[in-house]
Image (cartoon, rainbow, N blue to C red):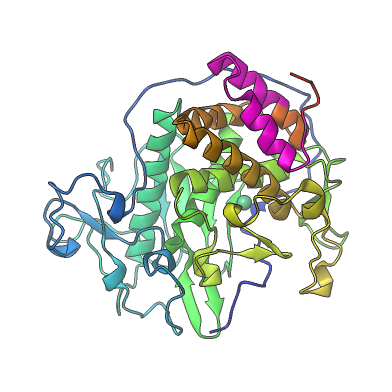
Amino acid sequence: MQKAKQAFYLILIHWTLVGCQNGFDARGINSFHLSSVEASLNGPENSDNEAVHPPPRSCFDNTQVNACLIFKNHITANNGPIYSSTSFSSDLTDFQTFEVNIEGTDSSGYLQNSDVKINITDGQRIKRTNNGDWKYTYKNNDSHRALAQTTSYYVINTTIQYLIARGGNPTQNLQLPVDALDMSVENNAYFNLATESIRIGYAHFTDFQQELALSTEVVIHEYGHAAMLKASGGATKYFNTNTNKRCISESSDLCCANANGCSVAIDEGAADVLAVFMYPDNPGIGNVLSNDIEGLSQLGVSRNVDSEMSLTKQQAFNAPGAFNSAYSDYNGEIHVMGVVYSSAWRLTWLSAKDAGLSREIEEIFLEHLSSMTGNDTFSTALDKILTIDRAFYKSRHQQRFLDAFATKGISPTIRP
Ligand SMILES: [Zn+2]
């Protein structure tokens, strides 16, 4: 098995270097508080509806559900690396034990509604099977990558429902276009800021090829960029070019200018936070690319927050990048810096979870998306987080946030 773990995969936003037009703008408190249904991506082991899902039956025989997906991805479902030579023609039906109902599609017959629209470049858009359900098997002739399509629709809609239950839907009525498979995108997926659409490629190694959409945490990560963009009123399109810079002059990849962080790294970290919120027991990002529960490693830094709890902003900024001399100057690479941010949120969330209050952290997280601008650093982001906590919960979580961010070497600019 050719390991991808050491390689440098971006899972990126398609950035264009434009100057920051936005000033410091701490708007957004209570900007979108609605109430709605609860939703989460619970694995089968966490299911609380055994009465509806009798365990002995195969998902494909269970008439109570209309889709048989893979929980998170087949590496996670397998609780470890899968066999080598997995490819588009492999049989993954044994992993399709995640029994769900795909709901909310509009009258078009396709996987779309007012919030999201599943497209596909390499395949045809699917409709329901002849049985009236969405139970497509992944083997041999899944020529339209039906599982990639159903999975993308399901996880994005579930994530939207999760956000609605915590205060609002930043991408409401956007009919966010999602390309479930574009074979011209190798080992990557991204949110295109110009077209405001998600484009998902495939994992491509010599003995391993798979739709990256099957790594559903990556799909959620990309959706997180859409949520940040819309919640912030487009602020992430315009970032401060003093704090966000080209990593090296000949590359369009972005790096923070210093260890204090930058808005694009906050965006990357927040996208990971959302994926970890949706899979709190399985926080690795990029399992299908790495063939590893741990997820990706970039410049020696894991994209699994639980492995980077003690990572400081300075350590992340100085991440060695020793695997490839071409990237030796990538100090401050935004995904690596993003792990500083995501692990700070994870520490806060775990602390609140111990107190039975983790949901409040999730609500603060959603609200803070709307306050971000292209000028933010880790410290100004923390200022805004504390302001929201004060407004929402009378600073109940202030010390949690201060302690978690202090572990990263981050303090607020305004002493609370
Ligand atoms: Zn990203």
Residue 395 sits in quarter: top right
Relative to the observer, which residue lies in front, 225 or 174? 225
The segment highlighted magenta reads: 383-411
403 part of magenta stretch: yes
Residue 379 lies within the magenta run:
no
Horizontal side, residue 86 vs residue 262: left or right: left
Residue 9, x across and y down, in percent: 65, 65
Tell me: 169 left or right of 388: left
Q: Can residue 376 be seen? A: no
**Residue drawn at (57%, 83%) of the image:** 2
Residue drawn at the location 71% of the way across and 45% of the way down: 265
Residue 145 appears at what percent x and percent y?
Answer: 36, 67
Residue with the most extreme front position: 354
Q: Main secondary structure of the magenta part?
A: helix
Q: How many marks?
A: 0
User: In this picture, is 267 found above or below 389?
Assistant: below
The answer to whether residue 114 is seen in the rendering is yes
Q: Measured from the top left, where is residue 309 in percent x and y?
A: 65, 50
Direction from residue 406 to residue 387 in the image, left or right: left
